[in-house]
Structure formats: structure tokens, C-alpha cells
Amino acid sequence: MTTESTGNGTERAERAADFDFDTLDRPIDWNAAAPHFDDAPDHGLRDADVRAAWADRLADWLPEAPADVLDLGCGTGSLALLAAERGHRVTAVDSAPRMVEHARAKLAGTDAEVLVGDAARPPLDGRRFDVVLARHVLWMLPDPESVLRHWCTLLRPGGRLVLVEGVWGEQSPVGLPLTRLTRALAPLAGRVHTESLSADARLWGGPVTDERYAVVAAVAGPRRHTEVVDVHLIVRSGDEVLLARRKDTGYADGLLHAPSGHTEDGEDVRAAVIREAEEEVGLRLAPEDLRVALVMQHRGPGAAPRIGWFFEADHGAGGTPVNREPGKCSELGWYALDALPDDMVAYCRAGLDAYRAGERFVVHWHEDDDPVAYEQGAAGRAVVLPMSAG
């Protein structure tokens, strides 16, 4: 149940049984805590009675299997494992790589996917789920209300939030009071169910006296459709284009893709691609260096659709490309536009093929069981939209 550092210098731990909440004033090293994290009864669920108690609760909180369950701040994956054992399709996220290592080992033999990422903004690339599950995570984040709004966007229509929270400590209590959480959920959820968990000693491996509770919130009815807007840069050097190989991002790792990113709030697509170009490949482009190459609506396998703007720039504009994000990119390379490699993200390959053919508007719609990677000879998903003759 770990998260990214909030920047306020006071990340705090989950349980009074593990940390002294009344004196804690330093950040927690979750990687260092990982080897002993499961020693707490409600972390490792090693005791049969504790494990059964959590399994019974999840059976009540989760929908009928199989459902797509997203466990955020998953720690070592104990709840994710219970969900997977019930037949759910589980994706788990934690910011601490050593926690993720333990979770992957625990979930070995299941179909669960465990990613390194921030619980507040998990690296899901548009995928949506039936359940967002988080235990003792939300209270550590600096703006729970904003996080809840974002988590709701990760849910499909009819999806639900399953949140286990509490307030711990005596001299200086810390946590998230139930009243604050239900108030934050009021504009987001059509139905909110709450349960007190303090009296169920089986859940904690013994009696507790502080406030512990669960909230199951069904998201409000159909919302106005929104789509993420992403931007892509086609750097041209004669007949070659620049591609970057993705690494440790949680999406399409090992595959080639054009330098790309998402627009931020209040940012237009041209400003976004200029910013991403500098962040990823060190190019300081000016607006006049850019030309619109292609607009593509695309949908990844099992993901929500998004709008992609592809811009073209000549090699030499803004400097020489360099790998500015070696933690996310293993290499940069130049590739012939008329002989692109196969090991590419499928929709990016389709976009470049359409661009080379002179097309400007494309829809690329994956089926849920399609691979993310381009596959030679596989069914093409790109549909070219004709332009007006006028």
C-alpha cells in the first residue's frame, strides 16, 4: 500500500502495529520495509483466520467474477491475490519496486499484472476497470478529493470504488475520517455503502480500538464522454524517422514508438508536443518548426479511446536528439519510413504508414484481445477517413 512521495516530507505508514503514528515525522522507505511488510497479520494474511476474514469481505465488496480489478498501492499483493483467486482479472500498482517484486512473486501462477507506478496517477494508458480497490492508501495522498475524481475516470460505467481507510494514533491521530471521504464521494457516486471494520478483530489479527472502515461506492450514472489527447513527434531526416524504444513504463515496454506524451490541463496540442520533445529527446522546437502530419483516434486493447495528434519536424530543428529519459527509453534510432521495423506499437506503426501514404485522418480501433505490438500479417485496424474534396 505504498504511494509516490507526496512532496510534503511526511509520508506516513499504514498501521500502528508497524509504525508509531504519534511520533512519525519522517518519510517511509517502502523499499526497505518490503522484506518485513508481510509480518503484520493484515498485510501478509499468513494466519488462516485473518486471510479468511479478508476473503469474506472481498466476496461482499467485489462484483461477480470475472471482473477487471485495479488494486492501487497494492504493497506485497495480498488483497490482489485474494481477488485473483476468486477469478477476477487483476492489475496491481505500487510505487516501490521491491514491493512490486514481492507482489509478483506472490501472484505468480495467476494472470495478474503488477506495475510500478504512482497510485494517484497509475500508468494504465487509458485502460478502464470494473473495480478500483485501495486499502490504507488514500489518506496518505495530499489531495484525496482530486485523487478520487481521477480514480472514477478509471472505472467503466457501473464500476465501483472499494476503499479501506481509517484514523490511527492517539496523541496525534492520522488518517482519513469517514465523514471527509463520504463528503468527497457525494458528487461522484450514485450509491455509497459504508462498513465499520474496527470490531472485527479477525481482520487485524487481534482487537483494535481506532477507527477502521470500508466504503463501497458505485460511480454515478453515465458521464459526458471525454478522451485523453496525446501528441506524437515525427522527426524527419531525409527518408528516415526517429523512434524511441520504451522501457519500464508499464505499457508497450520493449517496443518502438515515436516521441510522444499527453496534453496537460489548459495546454494546446502544439505546446504539448514542444514540451514533450524537450523532455524526451532534448529538442527545443519553436512553433514554426512544426507541421501537422496526422490526426488519429485510436483505442488500445481493452482501453478507452483517445485522440492522437502527429506533428512533423525536420532533423536539426531544435538541436540534435538525445535520450533525456533513460529510465523510460532504452535507445533512440533512425529508421527508414518505407521499411519500418515490426517491433513497434501497433497504432504508431499504423499512423506512420498512413502518414507515408499521404493520409491525414485515421481511426485505429483495437479489439480487446489484440496485441499492443504490431504483428505483420495480422488484421489491420486502421481506417482512413476521406477528406473533403473542397
Image: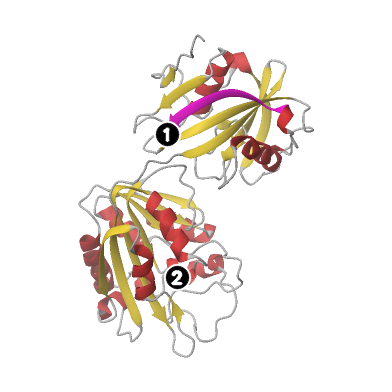
Residue 51, located in which quarter of the rendered image? bottom left
Q: Determine the residue positioned at 46% across, 18% down.
A: 376
Say if 334 sits above or below 263 in the image: above
Residue toward you, 208 or 183: 183
Residue designated by label 2: 139
- Verify CB contact (< 8 Å) between mark 2 and mark 1: no
Query: In the picture, residue 360 is in which quadrant?
Result: top right
Q: Is 149 covered by the magenta stretch? A: no
x and y, in percent, of residue 246 in the image: 58, 38
Identify the secondary structure beneath mark 2.
Answer: helix
Q: Name which residue lies at 54% across and 17% down.
A: 353
Q: Could you tell me the amino acid type at mark 1?
A: Gly
Residue 55 in the image: state x and y as whole percent: 25, 64
Which region is colored magenta? 289-299
Q: Locate the N terminus and report the quarter of the image it occupies.
A: bottom left
Q: Amino acid at mark 2?
A: Trp
What numbered label is drawn on residue 300? 1
Residue 260, image quadrant: top right
Residue 76: x %, y % from top left: 43, 62
